[in-house]
C-alpha cells in the first residue's frame, strides 16, 4: 500500500485511519470518514480508466470495501478492471490488484463455509467450488510480480515475497495438501528476524497440529508468542489464544485452557464488541464468518476435554494410569455451555444492556436517596475521542443518554474538573443543576441540558458528577462480581434447553444442554448417524417442516392416471404423512435422550441455533398415535440465549405497572412492485385491523404506513405517552444481499409511495436503533423471520 499510495495523496492518510478503525470494529466510522472526504467514483467508467490518479482511487475504494466486509462488491469492481491492471501496468499497482482479488475470494469462501448449508451461496461461488487452486494461482502470480517488478535491493520487496509465501502455505493447508505445504516451507526465504513473523509461525503451528506433530506445534506456538501481543490485529491475537487452548488441551492443562478462553473474551469485549458501531452489517458479517467459528471450536474442545478427563491420561503418546476426574469433567461441560451461550449472546447484547444489568443489581445495595443520582460521562465506543454519553444512576432508575458533545478523554476530564466529586463512603449529594447552571453555564449547556428533562421527570433534585473510573470502580465494581457469581434465575419446574450446532457439519452431532442452574447442567451429544441421517438429509427435513408442502415428490405412473384434483389431493396426503413421520422422528432425535432430565419440568425455554431454530418444536409428536404434541406436555417459549433472557428477567419491574398504554397498529396495503415480485409478498396484511374493529379493543390504526409516517412516529416517542407498537407487515432478512449502508441485518418493508424507489420504503433496524424509544413499552413484529 505504501508503494501505491503516495503520502501526498489524501487517500493515504484516510487509508491508515480506516484500517485502524476496522481492526477494532468501527465499520460505521469508516463509512463516515469516506463520506466526509467525498471519496466517489464513476462505476460506469471503471473499465476505461487510464489516468493513474483515478486508478489509485479505485484501488483505494476496493480496499475500503474489503475492510468494511463488502468484499463481494470489491471483487466485482476488480473483475471489471482486469484490462487496466494487466501485465504491462505499474508493478506495485498490479501486485495490490492481485492480492486484493485473492483476499476477496478468501473472504467469500470463508463466508460460504460459515453457513451450515446454503445452496444459493454455493451456486453463486462456482469459481471457488470448481477451481480450488484459483487463489493460489493469484498469489503465485503476485509473488512473481513482487520478484520481477519490485526493487530486489529493497527489504520491503523481500518482506512482501515472504508474506505472500506465508499466504500460499495457508491456502495449501486449507486444501489439506500437506506435501505442498512442506514443499513451500522449504522454499521460504526469511527476511530480518524470523521471530517477529507472528502470522507465519501461527500458520506453521496450525500445520503441525494438522499433522499431529505435537512437539513442533508447541515449538511454533512458542515462537509466535514472542511478538504476537505487539500486533495491532485483534483477530490475529485471538487466533493465537485459540491455538494456545488447543496446546493446553493436549497437555491436559485445565487452568491455562480456561485462561486462554477468558483472554479472548476480554480482548473482544474491549475492542470489537465494545465499539458503539458493533452492530453494523460489517460486524455482523465478521462475527458470523470468523469469530463465531472460534467459539464453535472452543465449545467442541470443552466437550472433548470433558470426555478426556474420564479416560486414562495420555500426553505426547504416553499413557498414564490415573483415576477419572468427574468433577473437572462436569466443569468443562459447564464451560462448553457458557461458551455456546456467550457465542449466541454476543450478537444481541449491547454495552447498554450490560450496564443496565449492573445498575439493577447495584441499586439494591447502594443506598442512594430517592431524589438523588450519580452522573458520569464517557466517550461512546472504543476510541479516545468521540461523542459523549451520560450515565445516570439513581435508586429507582438508570439510563444512558447521548449528547452531541465531541471530546477526547483528556479534554473531557479537563472540562468536567470544576464539578467532579469523589464518590465517598456515605453517598452524599451536594450538587444541583441550578447551582451548576449559575456557576458554570458552559458545563450546564454541554453536559446537563441533554439530561435535565429525564432528571426532572424522576424528581431528581441533587446530583453528584463523578469520573468514569470512580463510577465503575467504586459504584459498580461489587455488582460486576456479584453478577458473575449469582445463580441463574430459573423457577422450579422450569429449564432452558440449548441445541448447539457447533459440530453439526464436522461430526454430524448436535450438542444439547439442559440448564437448571449455573452449576446444574446436563449434557447430551446427539449423533445423527445413530438415526441413519446425514446432515444434508437432516437439514432438508427441517426445511420441509418449516416451509410446508412445497417440496412434494412426483407421483408414480399409476397416480398420473387420476384427475388433476386427485393428484393434488394425493400430494397433500403424502406430504401430511411425511410431516407426521418427521414430527415423530425429530422428537425421538432431540427429546428422547433428555426426557430423563425433564421428569419434574413443566416449562421449557428453547434456544436453537442456525437452521435448528426452524424446527417446529411445539408440534413435535410425543406419541405414536399422533394424539400428543410436545406443547401438550410442556409450556414452551423460545429465547435468543440464556444470557439475554436472564438480563431481561433481571430488568423486569418487580411490581405490575398501572400505567395505561396506547395501542398503535401499523400495516401496509401495497409494497413496491420490485419487492413484491422478488420476494413473493403480493398480499395485504390489513386483516388484523378489520378483526380488532369487532373486538372491544381501543387502538389507533395506520393502515398504509409509509416510511415517513413510521419515522415521525418513532421520532416523537420521547415526549409521548406510553405506547404499544404493533407492526403487521413484511420484514426482510438477508445479510448477504443488503448493500445499503444503513442495513444491520434486516428491515421493515413499508407502504410504497408512487414515484419513489423501493429503498425509500425500507426502514432498517440500524435506523430504528437511533430513536429514543423509552416510552414504547412493548413492540410486536408480526411478520416473517422476526426471530432474526
Image: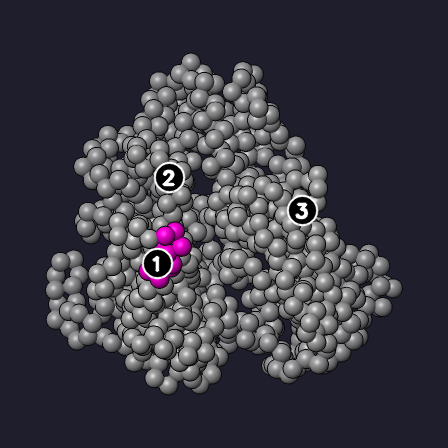
Q: How many marks?
A: 3
For image coordinates 84% across by 59% down, the residue present is 441
679 relative position to 184: left or right = right
Q: Are marks 1 and 3 in contact (CB under 8 Å)?
A: no
Res. 110 visible in picture: no
Task: Report how far apart the C-alphas of labels 1 and 2 lie in the structure.
Answer: 33 Å
- Which of pointers 1 and 3 lies earlier in the amino acid sequence? 1
Q: Residues within 10 Å of mark 2 (few under 14, many from 20)?
A: few
User: Looking at the rendered structure, which numbered label has been put on residue 123?
Assistant: 2
Q: Which residue is mark 1?
A: 570
**Residue mark closest to the camera, 1 vs 3:** 1
Task: Report how far apart the C-alphas of labels 1 and 3 lie in the structure.
Answer: 40 Å
Residue at the right extreme? 438
User: Looking at the rendered structure, which numbered label has been put on residue 752?
Assistant: 3
Please tell me whether residue 234 is drawn above or below residue 689 in the rendered image: above
Could you tell me residue 669's position as x and y percent? 66, 53
**Residue mark closest to the camera, 1 vs 2:** 1
Q: Residues within 10 Å of mark 3 (few under 14, many from 20)?
A: many
The secondary structure type at the circle numbered 1 is helix
Q: Residues within 10 Å of mark 1 (few under 14, many from 20)?
A: some
Q: Are marks 1 and 2 in contact (CB under 8 Å)?
A: no
Task: Report how far apart the C-alphas of labels 3 and 2 lie in the structure.
Answer: 32 Å
Q: Does 573 lie within the magenta span? A: yes
Q: Nearer the viewer, residue 266 or 412?
A: 266
Q: Which residues are magenta?
A: 563-575
Could you tell me residue 309's position as x and y percent? 22, 70
Amino acid at each position: 500500500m505504501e508503494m501505491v499510495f503516495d503520502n501526498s495523496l489524501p487517500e493515504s492518510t484516510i487509508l491508515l485511519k480506516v484500517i485502524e478503525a476496522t481492526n477494532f470494529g468501527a465499520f460505521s466510522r469508516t463509512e463516515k470518514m469516506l463520506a466526509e472526504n467525498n471519496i466517489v467514483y464513476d462505476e460506469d467508467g471503471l473499465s476505461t480508466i487510464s489516468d493513474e490518479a483515478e486508478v489509485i482511487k479505485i484501488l483505494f475504494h476496493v480496499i475500503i470495501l474489503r475492510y468494511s466486509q463488502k468484499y463481494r462488491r470489491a471483487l466485482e469492481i476488480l473483475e471489471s478492471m482486469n484490462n487496466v491492471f494487466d501485465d504491462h501496468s505499474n508493478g506495485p499497482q498490479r501486485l495490490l490488484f492481485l492480492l486484493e482479488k485473492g483476499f476477496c475470494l478468501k473472504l467469500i469462501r470463508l463466508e460460504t463455509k460459515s453457513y451450515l448449508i446454503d445452496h444459493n451461496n454455493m451456486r453463486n461461488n462456482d469459481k471457488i467450488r470448481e477451481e480450488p487452486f484459483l487463489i493460489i494461482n493469484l498469489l503465485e502470480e503476485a509473488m512473481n510480480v513482487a520478484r520481477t517488478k519490485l526493487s530486489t535491493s529493497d527489504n520491503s520487496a523481500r518482506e512482501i515475497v515472504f508474506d505472500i509465501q506465508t499466504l500460499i502455505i495457508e491456502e495449501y493447508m486449507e486444501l489439506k495438501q500437506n506435501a505442498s505445504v512442506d514443499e513451500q516451507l522449504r522454499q521460504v526465504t526469511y527476511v530480518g528476524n524470523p521471530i517477529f513473523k507472528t502470522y507465519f509461525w501461527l500458520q506453521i503451528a496450525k500445520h503441525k497440529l494438522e499433522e499431529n506433530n505435537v512437539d513442533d506445534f508447541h515449538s511454533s506456538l512458542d515462537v509466535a508468542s514472542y511478538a504476537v501481543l505487539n500486533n495491532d490485529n485483534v483477530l490475529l491475537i485471538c487466533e493465537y489464544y485459540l491455538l494456545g487452548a488447543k496446546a493446553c488441551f493436549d497437555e491436559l492443562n485445565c487452568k491455562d485452557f480456561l485462561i486462554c478462553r477468558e483472554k479472548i473474551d476480554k480482548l473482544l469485549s474491549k475492542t470489537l464488541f465494545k465499539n458503539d458501531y458493533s452492530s453494523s452489517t460489517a460486524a455482523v458479517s465478521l462475527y458470523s464468518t470468523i469469530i463465531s467459528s472460534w467459539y464453535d471450536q472452543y465449545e467442541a474442545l470443552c466437550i472433548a476435554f470433558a470426555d478426556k478427563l474420564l479416560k486414562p491420561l495420555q500426553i505426547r503418546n504416553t499413557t498414564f494410569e490415573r483415576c477419572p476426574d468427574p468433577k473437572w469433567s462436569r466443569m468443562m461441560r459447564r464451560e462448553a455451555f457458557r461458551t455456546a451461550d456467550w457465542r449466541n449472546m454476543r450478537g444481541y447484547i449491547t454495552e447498554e444492556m450490560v450496564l443496565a444489568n449492573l445498575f439493577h443489581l447495584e441499586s439494591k445495595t447502594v443506598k442512594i436517596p430517592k431524589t438523588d443520582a450519580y452522573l458520569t460521562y464517557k466517550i461512546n465506543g472504543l476510541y479516545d475521542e468521540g461523542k459523549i454519553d451520560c450515565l445516570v444512576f439513581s435508586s429507582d432508575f438508570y439510563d444512558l443518554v447521548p449528547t452531541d458533545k465531541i471530546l477526547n478523554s483528556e479534554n473531557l476530564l479537563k472540562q468536567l474538573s470544576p464539578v467532579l466529586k469523589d464518590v465517598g463512603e456515605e453517598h452524599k449529594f451536594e450538587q444541583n443543576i441550578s447551582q451548576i447552571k449559575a456557576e458554570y453555564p458552559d458545563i450546564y449547556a454541554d453536559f446537563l441540558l441533554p439530561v435535565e428533562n429525564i432528571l426532572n421527570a424522576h424528581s431528581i433534585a441533587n446530583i453528584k458528577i463523578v469520573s468514569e473510573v470512580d463510577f465503575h470502580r467504586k459504584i459498580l465494581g461489587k455488582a460486576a462480581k456479584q453478577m458473575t457469581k449469582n445463580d441463574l434465575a430459573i423457577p422450579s419446574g422450569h429449564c432452558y434447553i440449548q441445541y448447539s450446532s457447533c459440530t453439526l457439519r464436522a461430526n454430524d452431532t448436535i450438542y444439547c444442554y439442559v440448564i437448571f442452574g449455573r452449576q446444574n447442567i446436563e449434557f447430551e451429544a446427539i449423533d445423527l448417524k445413530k438415526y441413519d441421517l446425514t446432515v444434508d438429509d437432516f437439514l432438508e427435513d427441517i426445511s420441509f417442516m418449516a416451509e410446508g408442502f412445497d417440496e412434494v415428490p412426483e407421483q408414480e405412473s399409476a397416480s398420473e392416471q387420476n384427475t388433476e384434483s386427485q393428484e393434488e389431493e394425493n400430494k397433500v396426503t403424502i406430504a401430511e404423512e411425511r410431516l407426521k413421520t418427521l414430527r415423530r422422528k425429530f422428537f425421538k432425535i432431540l427429546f428422547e435422550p433428555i426426557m430423563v432430565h425433564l421428569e419434574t419440568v413443566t416449562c421449557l425455554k428453547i434456544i436453537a441455533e442456525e437452521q435448528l431454530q426452524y424446527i417446529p418444536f411445539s408440534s413435535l409428536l410425543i406419541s405414536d398415535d399422533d394424539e400428543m404434541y410436545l406443547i401438550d406436555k410442556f409450556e414452551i417459549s423460545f429465547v435468543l440465549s440464556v444470557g439475554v433472557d436472564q438480563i431481561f428477567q433481571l430488568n423486569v419491574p418487580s411490581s405490575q405497572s398501572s400505567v395505561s398504554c396506547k395501542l398503535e397498529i401499523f400495516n401496509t396495503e401495497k409494497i413496491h412492485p420490485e419487492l413484491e415480485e422478488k420476494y413473493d409478498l403480493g398480499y395485504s396484511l390489513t386483516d388484523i385491523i378489520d378483526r380488532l374493529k369487532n373486538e372491544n379493543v381501543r387502538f389507533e390504526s395506520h393502515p398504509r404506513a409509509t416510511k415517513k409516517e413510521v419515522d415521525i412516529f418513532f421520532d416523537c416517542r420521547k415526549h409521548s405517552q406510553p405506547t404499544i407498537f404493533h407492526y403487521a407487515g413484511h420484514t426482510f432478512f438477508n445479510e448477504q444481499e443488503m448493500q445499503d449502508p444503513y442495513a444491520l441485518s434486516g428491515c421493515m418493508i413499508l407502504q410504497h409511495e408512487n414515484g419513489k424507489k423501493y429503498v425509500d420504503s425500507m426502514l432498517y433496524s440500524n435506523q430504528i436503533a437511533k430513536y429514543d424509544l423509552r416510552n414504547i413499552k412493548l413492540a410486536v413484529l408480526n411478520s416473517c423471520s422476526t426471530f432474526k
